[in-house]
Structure formats: structure tokens, C-alpha cells
Image (spheres, grey):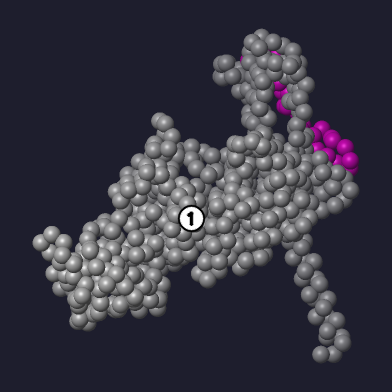
Amino acid sequence: MPKRSLLIALLILIAASVLQVAANQEEIFIYMITVDTSSDWTEVILSGGPKIISYDYSLKGPTELRYSIRPEYISLNKRAYDATPVSANMIFLALRGESWSFTIRKGDIGFTRVSIYKWIDGTFRLEQSFLNEGTNPQYPGTNDRTFFMNLLYDKPAGRALYEDTAGKFNRLILTFYYPWYGTPNVSGKWFHWEGVTGESIANTAHYPLLGIYDSWDERVINAHILMAKSSGVDCFIVSWWGIGSFEDEAFKRILKVAERQNFSATIYYESYRPWSPLVSEGDVIRELSYVLKSYSKSKAFLRIDGKPVIFIYNVPAHGRGPQFWLNVRRALEREFGEIYMIGDLRDPSYLNVFNGFHTYIELNRSSMSDLYLMMKREMSLGLSGITFNEAIEAIKEGRILSVERKALFYTVVPGYDDRKIRHPGNYLDRAGGKTYRMFWEDALKSGAGIMITSFNELHEGTEIEPTREYGFMFLNITREYCRKLKEVHEERAPQIKFSFSISRDGKNLSMDLINEGGPAIAVELSSLPQFVKPLSKYSQNGKVLVPLIGEGEIYRVNFSLENASIRELRISFLLSFYSASGHLYRLEENDLPVAFLVNVTSPCGIPKGSGWYIAGSKANISVEESAPDPYLWILGGKYVFEGWT
């Protein structure tokens, strides 16, 4: 390419970049509202006006003054008939908006004056003043007077780069995931399971379809991820309790499996830990630094625009204010670069610290809707990682600020039942899926990001993972609404083909379950004769329940025939399992359990009562006849759950 052409192309590229930066810039205005009153109470309700991104306020008045000051509402309350002068000043940074209206309410005594100032050329200049004095017979008791102000939005104080963080989380479906379940067979101890029998669990609302599982078991993790993906879920937000904790070890395995499945995961930093000593600011920085250093380079760790995303539970816990979390954020970004922090809170004072906001759970639909509307009104637009005073100084120095539209999330729940672990506890009826559907409908109407509480918080009964009580119902509802949101069509259920073979493995009998099709979830061998003892870490109450047998995988189950009667040579079983999308399959022979014959030769028979029994340590076992050719069939209809046999 000739030099002149190359130069022209370079200039065009630079010009395009400059134009793009300019297109992402917004004008910033600084306003001050003063409210002066001699009435015993007053309220100022503001509607419309500029888009406020950050604010601060100051007060002058009696020590017993009760007040609330927010961008759209100012309330000042004294004792009845107290005419002591009160003054409130609110200074705020704002983007271009619309015209403004003010409704001033007050008691029957005194006056309230609202004055609007604008920062121009280094000083505040009065724009307009509104006075409500005396009484208004049209509004007895509140004396309402409404005023309007047309803002010209000229002479901005500064400029800011605008980032649409909310748009980057659009159509992303996240669910909270709990990796705290342990069993002696896998992680070496019981953890979070209590009072377990074949029929019930003392501390969970429901019984998981996968049985009493272990969160360190990669088969379980794989099954959970496959089910979540099949339902439209994009990411697990994984409860995390500190370096080297049980949940930390589980998270390592979750990321490992998620990498293979092209799935995402991040942590839910459990900041509320009510034990001594409390986790300090330095501890929080150390723990989150460990997470970012150890895990954020994984391709499965959730990133948006290349930035790792971390969710924080109960942000204000233990009195941790905005400055605490701003210090944490700055320490992390000095070491790791920009990150996204999404906080569980309802307080606008943290607006400039976090990139987005959510609430972990709200059981009342109306309250959830009101909460989201409040967040949309007061927490959707703000500065990024800078305090109000720092922003004012930056504007005075002519520096460009960063403003972002915050990511807001709507939380949906299937139901709630913590009555086994708390007294008296709380209960929200699932109503056969209606509760979950109504939350989903509300969430889709809001246009917010979607969070599901939860995938598997079994203690509080918020899980959508399959259970004996509900099967795949709540994953199927999730799939239905995820498809609406993402505008995708229903996929055909994967075809699964199973076969098995029998062989001798030392002193025991072995069965190879051969999966020749798609992944099989919750594979259960049941209806086994009492003399057939499965030797498997997945043996539960005389059954074998394998969380997952993958496509093309051969899974071996060993059986002991100790004390089996030599007259009972026919060994039968039922094999049932699910596809990741919830289709129930069974392996059967002519509507009967599949069976195979075993030849047992002497000298192995020992007398016991009126029969002869196999002495497993001496028996010579071989397959007398090849197993019959079973067939696999899917039960009629879609996503049918019939419970265990």
C-alpha cells in the first residue's frame, strides 16, 4: 500500500476512535437544592428533572430532627408546633434529563422554601426559588403546592464516559449454587446432611433425586451443570466461605467440570459470618485476592467484557459501609485490574462502589416488585469506583469521570420452607409451580437481569434441582421461561441407548452399564434381590444411584453374593434414568425387570436352615446364559416424573 494511502487509512481509524469516544461521553451538571423551613414538618417530592448519578447533603437544625434525604424525596420532621428554622442542602451530579416538578408539603405553621442552584464557572448561581407558606384549603393537613421548572441543560460542569454495564448482563440467567454437602464416601465426612434415611432428611425440605450426594463428587457437579444448561441457566453463583473451606475445595472441582461443559461459575462471597473474630477489611481483601489469583484465569470463571465478576452477599453485614467496600475494590483492582462487583443490598449510599445490585431473596411478589422499582429509580445510574467528593474535585480539575448504568437483577423463587431448621420458620407454597411462574412473569416484565434462588439450597426449600417430590418440574419451568427470554426454540430430547454386560470380577459379580447415547442423569438400579449386595459408593438403601453416566461411558457396578441361596439363580433388576432435559427412561424386558442367570458350582454350598447358600469367598461364579437383549423406552409424554419404584 502506498504511504499516502496508509496515512489516510490511519487518520480515518483515529478519527473513528475519537468519534466513538465522543459518542460515549455525557455532559455532567452540578446542582444544589436547599430546603429552608420554619414549619414543624415538611416534605419535598421531586419528579422528573436531571438524571442524578451521585449526591451528598448537609443539615442544620435541632438535634431531635428526624429526616430522610434522597434524590427524589426530602422529609424534615420536628416536634409539633416547633418553629425552629431548619435548612437542608443537597448537592448532586447529574446527566441531562427533563423538566422538573416539585410538590411541597408542610404543616399548618411557618413556611418552606425550595431553591435551585446551578454550578457555573466555579460557583453556584440561583436558578429559581419556590415558596409554600401558610395553609392550602384544597389540601387540609398537608397544604400541597406543586411547582414546575424547565431546565435548559446548558453550560455543563464537566464530562463523563458512559458505560452500559446493565446491557452486558442482559439475557444472562444466573442461579445460586450451594457446594456444602458432604458424605463419608467422597469427601470423608457428613456435612450439611442430618437425620438421613431412605425416606427423609431431617434438615431439608425435600429429598434430591440424585440421593444424598457429595459436592466434591465430579459426577454430581457434572449432572448439575448438564441439567442447568439444559434448562437455560448460564452460570452458577457458588456460595464461598473462605480459603481452604469445604466450599472452596468444591469450587475448584466446579470450575474444572464447568470448563469441560462450556459453563460459567463465580463465587458468592459470604460476607456475613457471625463468629469471632469478625472478618476484617484486610481479611476480605486477602480472600478475594486469593479467589482472583487462583480461579479467575479459568475459562469457566464468569467474565463480562474480559473482567471477572464477583457477587457479594449481605454487603452491609457487620456495619461495613461504602468506604469499606471501596477500599476493598481499589486494593483488588490495583493488583488484578478492573473487576465487576455485584452487591446484595438495598441502600443507594453504595451506588458508586458496586457495578450492580440484587437481593438474595424476597418471598413477597409485591415487595420484590417494589424493591426492583426502587432500585431502578435510585440505583440504576451512578459513578464507578469513586466518591462524591473525589468526583467534584475531578470536575474542578477538568478530568473526565466514568458513569455507568448499573446492572440490576430481579430474583425469582420457586417457593420457600425452612421450618425444619428454624422455628417457627417461614413458608411460601410452591402451588404446583404457580408461585415460580408468577415470579418469572414479573421478572420478564421488569426487563432486569434474572437470578434464581436457588439451584440447590435444600435447607430453605428454594431448590429447582430435581427432587423426589417434584421431579424435573421446576427445571422445566425454568427452561420454558429461559426460552422466552432468549427467544430460542425447544430442542429435541437427546436419544439415549443403554446396554449391559455381566462378568466375574474376582470373588464378586460385575455389571457394566454401557451408555451408547446422550448423558444419563440419576441412573438407578433397583428391585435387586436381597442377597445381591452392591459394592459402590453410590449404594443407598439397597439401590445403586449414580448421578451421571456420560455419553459413551461404561460404568461398572460390583455385587457381592454372600449368603445368596443357590436356588435363587435368577437375578433381576430395574434400571431407570433421566436425560438432562428431564425425560424418564427405563430399561425393561417385556414390561418385567431385566434378568440374567448365574451358574454357581460347588464346592460352595453350605447348609443353612432348609436351604443352601453361596459362600462368597469360595464360590465359582460365571454367566450361564448371556443377558437377554433388553430394550429402552421413554414414558409417554414429555418430562414425566413418576417417582421411584
Q: Is residue 76 left or right of residue 235?
A: right
Across and down, in percent, residue 483 comes to: 43, 62
Asked where in the image residue 637 lies, by quadrant, the reply is: bottom left
Q: Relative to residue 4, is residue 643 depicted above or below?
A: above
Does the segment drawn in magenta span residue 110?
yes
Q: Residue at label 1?
A: 188
Q: Nearer the viewer, residue 431 or 294?
A: 294
In the depicted view, which residue is nearer to us: 88 or 606? 606
**Amino acid at dot 1:** Gly
Q: Residue furthest left?
A: 610
Is the residue 40 above or below the residue 221 in the image? above
The vertical placement of 330 against 600, above or below, is: above
x and y percentages locating residue 225 in the rendered image: 47, 63
Q: Is residue 551 magenta?
A: no
Chief secondary structure of the magenta span?
strand
State how many labels appear.
1
The N terminus appears in which quarter of the rendering?
bottom right
Q: Residue 429 in the image: x percent, y percent? A: 35, 41
Q: What is the span of residues highlighted in magenta in the rendered image?
A: 109-135
- Does dot 1 land on a helix, a strand or a loop? loop
Name which residue lies at 53% across and 61% down: 254
